[in-house]
Image (spheres, rainbow, N blue to C red):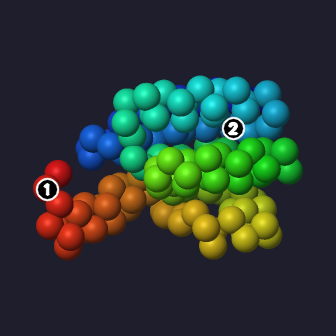
Amino acid sequence: MMSMIHTQPTSIDDMHVITFGTCFDGSAEPALEAAVLQVQEIQGKHIILNMETLTTLNSRALGKLFLTYHHLNRKQIRLSMVNPKPAVREMLAFVNFPKIVPIYDSVDDVVAFEQRQMESSGIPE
């Protein structure tokens, strides 16, 4: 199973996408930690977890997602998720994760939402 995770910036400088491979389990935890640290080092303020290709998510991975959320929250870094497959979305819903981390249909939807937020608050890009 592929557990590769990679990071890329969005069109908004302080937003970064972390894209999962097909499997997120214990073996992928170090890669997620490294990606989060990479975003923190470049002063990222919003991390988007792209779950588009993720097909396997175990309970240990759910725990790691909760820990990651709390770590980022303390550092005032927002977290969003995009496009989880139905089985992954169901697991996330079962543990009420969408109540603390919003789920969007695409990265573009998150970027558009953030742009609207910046425009309504008068913050320049």
| Mark sitting on residue 91 | none
Density class for disc 1 (Cα within 10 Å; few <14, some 14-19, many ≥20) is few
Which mark is first along the chain, 2 or 1?
2
Q: Are marks 1 and 2 in contact (CB under 8 Å)?
A: no
| Mark sitting on residue 22 | 2
Cα gap from disc 1 to disc 2, whole angstroms: 37 Å
Q: Is residue 40 visible from the viewing direction of this image?
A: yes
Q: Position of residue 40 (x, y in %)?
A: 46, 35
Q: Amino acid at mark 2?
A: Thr
* Horizontal arrangement in the rendering, residue 114 relative to residue 63 (left or right): left
The picture quadrant where one finds residue 116 is: bottom left
Q: Is residue 86 visible from the viewing direction of this image?
A: no
* Residue at left offset 86%, top offset 50%: 59
What residue is pinned by disc 1?
A: 124
* Residue at left offset 74%, top offset 45%: 64
The picture quadrant where one finds residue 14 is: top left
| Secondary structure found at label 2 | loop
Q: Relative to residue 50, is residue 96 depicted above or below? A: below
Density class for disc 2 (Cα within 10 Å; few <14, some 14-19, many ≥20) is some
Given residues 57 and 22, the one toward you in this image is: 57
Given residues 40 and 110, the one toward you in this image is: 40
* Residue at left offset 42%, top offset 49%: 46
The extreme front residue here reads 74
* Horizontal arrangement in the rendering, residue 58 relative to residue 19 (left or right): right
| Secondary structure found at label 1 | loop
Given residues 67 and 109, the one toward you in this image is: 67
* Residue at left offset 45%, top offset 41%: 17
